[in-house]
Amino acid sequence: MTEIIAMASDLTNLLLAGCLILLLLNLLRGRRQGRAARDPRLESLQRDLRALTAAAVGMGERVLEVERRQRRLAEKQENLDLFESANQPYEQAIHLARQGVDAEELVATCGLSRSEAELITIMHRLEGDQEPPSRAAS
């Protein structure tokens, strides 16, 4: 009788093991089917992610280009400001010389050297009254 009970116990263990194997196979098959069902959605999400990444990279490149252009424009603006501030005394001296102001007043008013003031006076004094030498010769 103990042999029958031992055989029944072994048979029960075999049946239990067989059921576990069948259960595991069903679980694996279900997972495979679930993966297959999720694959199109997963692929779609991956495509969307790639597209968003590419768009972000493109936008980053555009931002870098705008920043480079902004720096170049800022440098040009700074150079123009320096040029204008450097030429302001000369522009004022030319304007005054055209009105007939003499070199001494240009030195005092515009802060020019004596030779600069004389040169501006010679070149621009009463421009409207005389023709330039190149025109008079022709």
Image: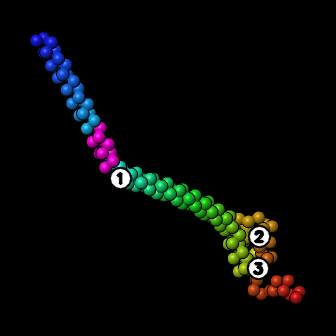
How far apart marks 3 and 2 lie (CA) works out to 11 Å
Q: Which residue is more in the foreground, 19 or 111?
A: 19
User: Residue 127: image x %, image y %?
Assistant: 76, 83
Q: Is residue 31 left or right of residue 90?
A: left
User: Residue 104: image x %, image y %?
Assistant: 75, 70
Residue 85 in view = no
How far apart marks 3 and 1 lie (CA) works out to 86 Å
Q: Which residue is more in the foreground, 31 or 54?
A: 31
Report the predominant secondary structure element of the magenta stretch: helix
> Which residue was labeled with disc 1?
40
> Which residue was labeled with disc 2?
117
Identified at 59% across, 63% down, the residue is 73
Question: Bounds of the magenta span?
Answer: 27-37
Which of the two marks, 1 or 2, is nearer to us in this view? 1
Identified at 73% across, 77% down, the residue is 97
Instruction: Of the two numbered discs 1 and 2 on the same chain, state the one appearing first in sequence.
Output: 1
Instruction: Of the two numbered discs 3 and 1 on the same chain, state the one appearing first in sequence.
Output: 1
Check disc 1: other Cα within 10 Å, few if <14, some if 14-19, many if 20+.
few
Q: Say if 9 sits above or below 47 in the image.
A: above
